[in-house]
Image (tube, grey):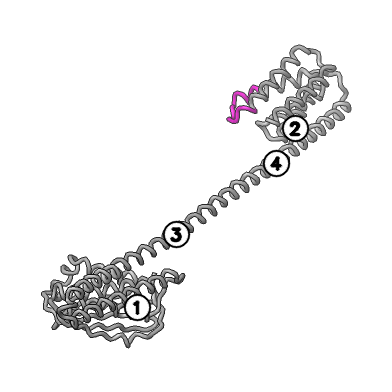
């Protein structure tokens, strides 16, 4: 739009100059007005139009011829459909032809002087257009750069806000999931233990007058259950406060001792255990500890439920890189190599144990040879 304004101003200036030399003022002014209309229309119409360009060229030629002097020929410098050197060549040639052939009232020397002036005027016009285009491009480039910078800054700000929100939500969800897991474990283990302790105390109260020794034994059992539950709560609180999400192997051993003791009190079944081959004070992921404790409960319960086992042997082995749980019983079941895949597929508990171990890069093995044996090994370094 700015170019159209400048072009129209130039046409007005050329018209004013040529008013003193033109012999057909009416047609000359009409040509000037029509040329201004065409240039203005071109400014609002970005699509190139052949008919419009031809019309513009014809009107410029009429403007130059009707001007009566060399100043009117400068208007060809505004013709954008052709290169600058084409505009100069055509304008100069047309002026020379008009001055020497049509007018015949100008000496050859004066024609050369005015031709040089015309060329100089063309060059000045081209220089002005070049400076305007350069200024416009620089302004446009700075505007685009500023816009891009603002957009980039706004986009980066939004990304930072989204990232902060996502991190906050992820951390919050992780903490909520951790608390939910711990609370569920406390409810499942401690709740069962306390309920069993209450029932044991009720039975002891009934037996107290008739069989005081048996009542005392039941009260001691209830006392051990409550103490074990209290220790489980303390360990859960330690895990909750631990930012690393890890616990010591000694805590895992104590938790497994409680699981075995409660199982023995509930079933009166013998369970031998050996935790000495797993080093003390090894830090293990809390997820692994929760999983292995649940796996121990699952294997003990399955041994009684599906194999009628009455003897168990539990081993906990490992070092700083691996941890392995082995549970063997003397039960009798139809679990064998041929039906193991289908039994595992249909058994939710065993399938869950295999799924967690594989997800963590560990391995499992189950066999039934003179009793059922389950083995779970987890790499501590790959905990997630």
Q: Which residue is mark 3?
A: 172
Q: What is the CA distance from the residue labelled 4 to the residue labelled 1?
A: 71 Å
Q: Which numbered mark, 3 or 4, is in the foreground of this view?
A: 3
Q: Which residue is mark 2?
A: 88
The answer to which of 330 and 101 lies nearer the viewer is: 330
Q: Quadrant location of residue 125?
A: top right
Q: What is the CA distance from the residue labelled 3 to the residue labelled 4?
A: 48 Å
Residue 90 placement (x, y as % from top left): 73, 29
Q: Which residue is mark 1?
A: 252
Picture residue at 74% right of the left edge, 37% below the top: 132
Q: Which residue is mark 4?
A: 139
Q: Assign the N terminus to one quadrant of the image.
A: top right
Q: What is the CA distance from the residue labelled 4 to the residue labelled 2?
A: 29 Å
Q: Are marks 2 and 3 in contact (CB under 8 Å)?
A: no
Query: Label 1: how many residues lie within 10 Å, few (<14), some (14-19) or many (20+)?
Result: many
Residue 229 placement (x, y as % from top left): 32, 73
């Amino acid at each position: 739009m700015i170019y159209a304004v400048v072009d129209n101003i130039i046409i007005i200036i050329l018209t004013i100059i040529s008013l003193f030399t033109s012999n057909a003022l009416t047609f000359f002014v009409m040509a000037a007005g029509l040329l201004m209309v065409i240039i203005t229309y071109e400014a609002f119409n970005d699509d190139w139009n052949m008919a419009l360009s031809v019309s513009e060229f014809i009107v410029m030629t009429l403007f130059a011829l009707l001007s009566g002097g060399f100043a009117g020929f400068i208007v060809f410098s505004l013709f954008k459909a052709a290169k600058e050197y084409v505009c100069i060549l055509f304008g100069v040639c047309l002026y020379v032809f008009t001055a020497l052939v049509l007018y015949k009232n100008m000496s050859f020397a004066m024609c050369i002087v005015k031709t040089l002036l015309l060329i100089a005027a063309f060059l000045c016009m081209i220089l002005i257009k070049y400076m305007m285009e350069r200024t416009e491009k620089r302004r446009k480039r700075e505007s685009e750069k500023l816009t891009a910078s603002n957009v980039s800054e706004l986009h980066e700000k939004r990304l930072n806000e989204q990232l902060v929100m996502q991190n906050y939500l992820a951390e919050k969800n992780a903490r909520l999931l951790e608390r939910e897991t711990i609370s569920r474990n406390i409810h499942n283990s401690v709740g069962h233990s306390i309920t069993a302790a209450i029932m044991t105390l009720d039975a002891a109260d009934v037996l107290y007058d008739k069989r005081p020794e048996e009542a005392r034994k039941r009260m001691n059992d209830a006392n051990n259950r409550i103490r074990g539950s209290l220790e489980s709560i303390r360990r859960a609180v330690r895990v909750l406060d631990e930012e690393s999400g890890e616990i010591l192997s000694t805590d895992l051993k104590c938790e497994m001792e409680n699981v075995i003791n409660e199982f023995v009190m509930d079933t009166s079944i013998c369970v031998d255990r050996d935790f000495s081959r797993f080093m003390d004070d090894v830090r293990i992921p809390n997820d692994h500890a929760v999983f292995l404790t649940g796996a121990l409960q699952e294997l003990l319960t399955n041994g009684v439920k599906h194999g009628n086992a009455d003897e168990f042997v539990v081993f906990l082995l490992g070092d700083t890189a691996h941890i392995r749980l082995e549970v063997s019983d003397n039960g009798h079941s139809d679990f064998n190599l041929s039906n193991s895949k289908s039994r595992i597929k249909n058994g939710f508990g065993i399938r869950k144990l295999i799924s967690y171990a594989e997800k963590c890069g560990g391995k499992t093995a189950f066999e039934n040879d003179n009793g059922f044996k389950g083995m779970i090994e987890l790499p501590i370094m790959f905990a997630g």
